[in-house]
Image (cartoon, rainbow, N blue to C red):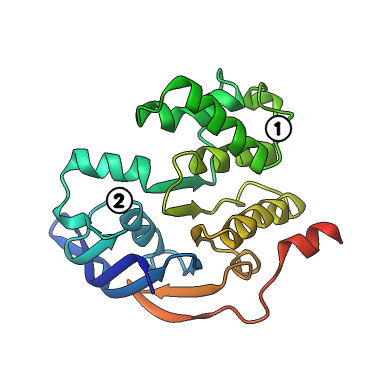
Amino acid sequence: MRYVIQIEDLKKVYQVGDQEIHALRDVQLNIADGDFVAIMGPSGSGKSTMMNVIGCLDLPTSGQFYLDGYSILDAREDELAIIRNQKIGFVFQKFHLLPRATALENVELPMIYAGVPAKERRLRAIEALTSVGLSDRMNNKPNELSGGQQQRVSIARALVNNPVILLADEPTGALDSKTSVEIMEIFQRLNDRGKTVVLVTHDQEIAEYAKRLIHFRDGRIEEDQPVGNRRMAAEEVKA
């Protein structure tokens, strides 16, 4: 089995004044290629810190962390920037789209940073937007799109560099229930095609679209188990 995430004895400690805040405590976590993992936990449980560490947005204090075989703790800042651009596709609750750019131009951005030639950028952006059902909205700007359509653009943007992992932080938090199901159908479809997905959510119903559910509490993994009675978004969309 190939693991895209390997974490051993991971700790994250913040210094606040003269106090040490232990955000993560001795975390052990492996995520296999092609898995779909939901991470849950109450406020202060460590789930957001874990998300930031997996996304290489924050470094752990100690432990081991390998992403697609790379030792993240040994990486320089410029190397981390390349890893974030090429290995990780980010999807957030807030869409973070450039307001004056079209959907197509927004999706091209990560490829500009990666140095992809213009013709290839355009073709890959079109393919990504088509894969999320927006072939007829490519030239629209964000204010001409619904919330669900904007999130589809952000998913397409996350896909264009063919990352090894999609990292989604509350991706349905700003959406209504019907649109949330449609977005989860996209994540499940991408996962069915082999894409590894890690989703952080406070919503138990959203977590049930994943294959595996991890609960954090007090900086530790409290529970890690397969999702029973997994929800299938494609069936709900058709209903």
Question: Residue 135, which numbered label?
Answer: 1
Q: Tell whether 223 sits left or right of 82.
A: right
Residue found 60% across the figure and 27% down from its top: 103
Which circle's residue, 2 or 1, is located before the other in the chain?
2
Q: Is residue 193 above or below residue 232?
A: above
Looking at the image, which is closer to me, 91 or 215? 91
Q: Residue at x 71, y 28 (%)?
A: 137
Q: Name the residue carrying label 2.
A: 56
Mark 2: give few (<14), some (14-19) or many (20+) Cα within 10 Å.
many
Relative placement, left or right, of 64 versus 206 is left
What residue do we see at 56% from left, 72% from top?
Answer: 211
Q: CA distance from mark 2 to mark 1?
A: 32 Å
Closest to the observer, 137 or 224: 137
Please provide percent x and percent y for residue 29: 34, 73
Any mark on residue 146, and which? none
Dot 1 crowding, Cα within 10 Å, few <14, some 14–19, many 20+: some
